[in-house]
Image: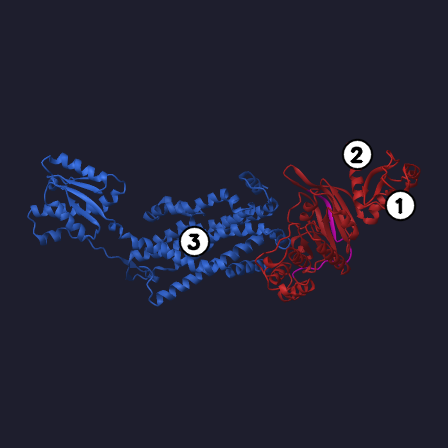
């Protein structure tokens, strides 16, 4: 980091805190009273369906939009533009200057984060080589395939070696190879001590790499905490069941809140505290049972349950 | 500060390296000289259009004199054709004149009555609006001269006395220099210089000011704005872009200026244009630079603000209109300001920031106004730039979120109020 950007304290307060952040566009409330804490060195996921307020939350953190109220702190300090140098950002609308050469582009973006020219150049070349784009350093972005452009965008995000990396709708629009690449890059950055915050509506993807999450819906926080804490708060059980031949599951199974058929077996989600074994007699009676396995609910099952409960609370 | 420079450098290099910059640098002067040279070359050739003017001359002296005077004045292509008055009398001759005009065998016709020398009255028959040019520029001056000379002759004034009486004034111009010296001066050249300087300011504002609009819209189109705003504030981003574009414009003008001076040093005549460096007093030079820069920044920031709100150039048209008026109105008022540079009208209008670059600078060139007025116009423009830069920054922040929806005046006003 150059002298102009003060470094962040290495220990202490959570790296990023949001306190009761609100933002409306006209009459429409995009984010209301969102509070969250991103622990240092973690991979943190802001999860929720499209239009739930993820991007607004992230843009507020980046000071791209100004929240109507609430505070945002980075390492305990109120966010001010100078601290932005510590944050790498990849928006959902990922752009590049099409007429600019790849190397120049990376150097330019690194310089904007305060990296000195020579260092920026060195790092940019390093990234290009690493991503297998060494031969494209002097080619214009226009000449690159979409997948290659995405790689350049990843490099641009990490090139300033920020303390916090923020990725909005991180996996959308990526091909499977690049999803894999980005996931590896995120994990690698974490091992270097970088904190990663990303938003996605792909809960399964998030579940694989997140340490902590915040679920939001309709601009409001549904729940947050480490993955372990979230699972503890929702001691749901799921049961996978299969019968020989075509058997439809019996109606009104005790404690089942949700059921779906996928990959040749049925999956039942049980309400809190329900004992999966209580289902067994009815399942056995329904036909020749070939599979019965209890396992953890997925993040999306937890999310749906949480949303449903919340709606019941609001209605009550 | 460093960040702004990084943005300035990128914006500048991308522009200067582009093909369109190279093409514009070469084609710009070519187009300009076409605009200057074509009217010059064609202006004198209007008379080449072959036209026949049928003349019914009842005095018997005017028609031959007319042909002679017209030929002397260089009215090529103009045929004076006598139309005799037959047995049917004048009325019949006029009827045949009219039918010749209508069947196209004559362009127009003159009827010179017998008492022309006494009354000074004649009639011009025509069926086209454009004939007025022929009447006022060719026929009337020629008839005036014929009338005058004939009256002198009838009053038995000697030829030498006639030349003496009709002599014209030759008013030589002498410019008084600041040191009290005298210099011969050619107003046409000085005036030409002033107009060129005004046009340079106008072009800078019109061409490069408007560039910021497309540059900002492109930036939104390439989805780079959001990436950039993660590193710099909207105001810095805009300032960097405007300066970068301005420098690219200055580079182009510098290339032109150097080429122009080099060519004229080597004696290459550029049109009928000669340089009069004496005209460039310190006040005019400083004013030129100031109005050039302030004018550019004012329009550039306004255009950038509009660009921030819009997703396409089409979207931006309705908002560009007031700015276009800011550029067109001074052009309409130029004549009035030129005639009376220190009138109240000229003073007030030239202080309006949008008009100052053209109107105040024109006043400086024509008849230097009190210095406080010049300084005031700079100050007002400075304030206007500051306000428009702030507004543009605000619109920038808001405009990024407006992908996909066309802006309206209402959203614009709401954005500025917030």
Q: Which residue is under mark 1? A: A293
Nearer to us: label 1 or label 3: 1
Estimate the x, y position of residue A221 in percent, counting from the top left. Answer: 75, 42
* Distance between mark 1 and mark 3 Cα atoms: 78 Å
Q: Is A261 left, or right, of B127 in this rendering?
A: right
Residue at x-position 53% and y-position 39%: B409
**Within-10-Å neighbours for mark 1: few <14, some 14–19, many 20+:** few
Foreground of the two, A16 or B381? A16
Nearer to us: label 2 or label 1: 1
Estimate the x, y position of residue B17 in percent, counting from the top left. Answer: 51, 61
Q: Quadrant of the N terminus of chain B?
A: bottom right
Residue at x-position 55% and y-position 51%: B218
Q: Which residue is under mark 2? A: A312
Q: Which mark is residue B182?
A: none
In what element is the residue under mark 3? Answer: helix
* Chain B color in figure: blue
Q: Which residue is under mark 3? A: B203
Q: Which residue is situated farthest in the left direction here?
A: B156
**Within-10-Å neighbours for mark 3: few <14, some 14–19, many 20+:** some
Estimate the x, y position of residue A4 in percent, counting from the top left. Answer: 65, 61
> Which chain hosts label 1?
A
Quadrant of the image occupied by residue B402: top right
Coloration of the structure image: by chain
Main SS of residues in magenta: loop
Foreground of the two, B165 or B215? B215
Task: Based on the picture, tell me whether residue B324 belongs to the magenta stretch.
Answer: no
Q: Quadrant of the C terminus of chain B?
A: top right
Identify the magenta region: A4-22
Q: Is B18 left, or right, of A210 in this rendering?
A: left
Estimate the x, y position of residue B237 in percent, counting from the top left. Answer: 58, 54
Quadrant of the image occupied by residue A310: top right
Tell me, by letter, which chain the rendering colours red. A
């Amino acid at each position: 980091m150059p002298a102009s950007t003060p470094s962040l304290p290495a220990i202490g307060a959570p790296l990023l805190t949001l306190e009761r952040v609100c933002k409306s566009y006209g009459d429409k409330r995009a984010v209301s009273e969102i509070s969250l804490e991103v622990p240092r060195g973690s991979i943190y996921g802001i999860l929720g369906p499209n239009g739930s307020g993820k991007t607004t939350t992230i843009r507020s953190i980046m000071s791209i939009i100004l929240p109507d109220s609430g505070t945002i702190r980075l390492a305990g300090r109120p966010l001010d533009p100078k601290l932005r140098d510590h944050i790498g950002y990849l928006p959902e609308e990922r752009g590049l200057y099409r007429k600019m050469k790849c190397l120049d582009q990376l150097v330019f973006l690194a310089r904007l984060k305060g990296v000195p020219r020579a260092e920026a150049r060195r790092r940019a070349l390093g990234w290009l080589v690493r991503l297998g784009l060494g031969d494209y350093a002097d080619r214009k972005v226009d000449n690159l395939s979409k997948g290659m452009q995405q790689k350049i965008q990843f490099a641009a995000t990490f090139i300033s070696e920020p303390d916090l990396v923020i990725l909005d709708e991180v996996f959308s629009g990526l091909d499977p190879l690049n999803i894999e690449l980005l996931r590896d890059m995120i994990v690698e950055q974490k091992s270097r001590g970088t904190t990663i915050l990303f938003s996605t509506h792909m809960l399964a993807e998030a579940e694989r790499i997140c340490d902590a999450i915040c679920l939001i819906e309709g601009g409001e926080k549904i729940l947050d905490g480490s993955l372990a804490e979230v699972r503890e708060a929702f001691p749901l059980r799921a049961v996978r069941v299969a019968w020989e031949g075509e058997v439809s599951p019996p109606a009104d199974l005790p404690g089942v809140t949700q059921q779906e058929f996928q990959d040749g077996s049925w999956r039942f989600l049980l309400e809190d505290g329900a004992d999966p074994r209580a289902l067994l007699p009815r399942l056995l009676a329904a036909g020749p049972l070939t599979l019965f396995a209890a396992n953890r609910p997925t993040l999306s099952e937890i999310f749906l349950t949480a949303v449903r409960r919340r709606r019941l609370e609001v209605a009550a | 500060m460093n960040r702004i420079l990084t943005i300035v450098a990128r914006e500048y290099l991308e522009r200067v390296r582009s093909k369109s910059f190279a093409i514009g640098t070469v084609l710009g002067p070519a187009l300009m000289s076409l605009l200057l040279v074509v009217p010059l070359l064609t202006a004198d050739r209007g008379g080449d259009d072959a036209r026949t003017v049928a003349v019914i001359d009842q005095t018997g002296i005017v028609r031959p004199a007319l042909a002679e005077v017209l030929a002397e004045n260089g009215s090529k292509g103009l045929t004076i054709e006598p139309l005799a008055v037959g047995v049917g009398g004048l009325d019949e001759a006029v009827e045949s004149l009219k039918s010749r005009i209508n069947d196209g065998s004559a362009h127009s016709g003159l009827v010179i009555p017998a008492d022309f020398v006494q009354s000074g009255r004649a009639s011009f028959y025509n069926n086209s609006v454009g004939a007025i040019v022929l009447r006022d520029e060719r026929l009337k001056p020629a008839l005036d001269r014929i009338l005058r000379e004939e009256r002198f002759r009838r009053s038995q004034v000697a030829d030498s006395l006639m030349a003496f009486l009709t002599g014209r004034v030759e008013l030589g111009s002498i410019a008084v220099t600041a040191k009290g010296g005298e210099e011969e001066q050619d107003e046409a050249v000085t005036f030409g210089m002033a107009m060129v300087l005004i046009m340079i300011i106008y072009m800078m504002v019109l061409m490069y000011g408007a560039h910021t609009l497309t540059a900002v819209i492109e930036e939104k189109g390439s989805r780079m704005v959001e990436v950039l705003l993660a590193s710099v504030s909207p105001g810095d981003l805009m300032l960097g872009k405007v300066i970068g574009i301005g420098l690219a414009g200055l580079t182009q003008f510098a290339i032109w200026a150097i080429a122009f001076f080099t060519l004229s040093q080597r004696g290459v005549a550029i049109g009928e244009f000669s340089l009069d460096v004496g005209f460039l007093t310190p006040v005019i030079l400083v004013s030129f630079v100031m109005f050039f820069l302030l004018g550019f920044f004012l329009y550039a920031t306004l255009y950038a603000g509009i660009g921030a709100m819009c997703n396409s150039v089409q979207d931006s048209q309705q908002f560009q209109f007031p700015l276009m008026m800011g550029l067109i109105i001074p052009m309409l008022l130029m004549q009035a300001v030129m005639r009376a540079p220190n009138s109240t009208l000229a003073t007030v209008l030239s202080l309006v920031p949008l008009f100052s670059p053209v109107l105040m600078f024109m006043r400086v060139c024509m008849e230097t106004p009190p210095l406080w007025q010049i300084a005031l116009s700079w100050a007002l423009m400075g304030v206007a730039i500051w306000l428009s830069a702030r507004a543009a920054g605000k619109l920038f922040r808001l405009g990024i979120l407006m992908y996909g929806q066309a802006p309206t005046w209402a959203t614009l006003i709401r954005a500025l109020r917030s």
